[in-house]
Amino acid sequence: VADLVGACRRSRIYSVCQIGFGANSQLDVDKPLAAIGVNVERIDVKLEDVFGNLEAIQKTASLAIARRLSQGPLPDLLFFTDDYLTLGALPVLLERGVRIPEDVRIVTLANRGFGPVFTKSFARIEVDMRKTGFALGRSLVNWFRTGEFPALPPDVRAVYVPGETFPSR
């Protein structure tokens, strides 16, 4: 999140819309972005309607972005908390003539090495869910044995990767 906030500051981003599966899937970007003067709005996609069905996720995302487009101008940045949400929203944005990154920048949360491949290199926050789950399991075992919950190792943390939709400079 710190790298995303830094990129927003450098790129003069003043408004962000975070699109995700309800409050549980949203990253905590509100406070760090508000600290640098960025307004954050949220669009929550109902998870129970789409869980496990990638086509349903994409369709729900396309409907959500269409509703958002009808409410007025887009913010400076669309931040999708799942790459399949991004995949569903892109056709609607392109159909409406929204230029990426000229009209809106896009960042997506993505599983490292898994998920859709985009023709345009999006800025993204990559997470290796398998490594993270394994490390979390080890930490839980340690907590049960010793009562201490160690911090996750640095190699399982999310990594911000700048892309052409959100240049790092």
Image (cartoon, helix red, strand yellow):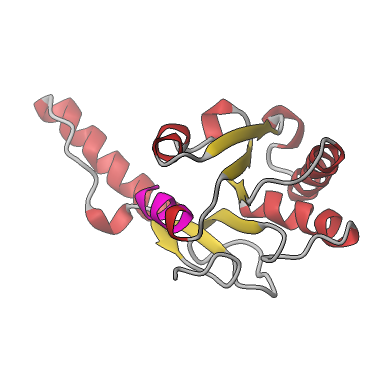
Q: Where does the image place residue 50, in percent across and percent down from the top left?
A: 74, 37
Residue at the extreme right: 95
Residue at image position (81%, 39%) is: 72
Between 98 and 46, the one lying in front of the other is 98
Residue name at image x 22 percent, y 38 percent: 139
- Total numbered labels placed on residues in the image: 0
> Residue 80 in magenta?
no
In the visual, does 1 lie left or right of 151?
right
> Which range is magenta?
1-8
Q: Residue at x 61, y 61 (%)?
A: 115
* Residue 100 in the image, given as x and y percentages of width and height: 71, 65
Quadrant of res 63: top right
Above or below, 22 relative to 103: above
Q: Position of residue 4 (x, y in %)?
A: 44, 53
| Residue 36 drawn above or below residue 97 | above
- Can you say which quadrant of the picture contains the C terminus? bottom left
Query: Residue 5 magenta-drawn?
Result: yes
Q: Is residue 123 left or right of residue 49?
A: left
User: 62 or 139, which lies in front?
Assistant: 62
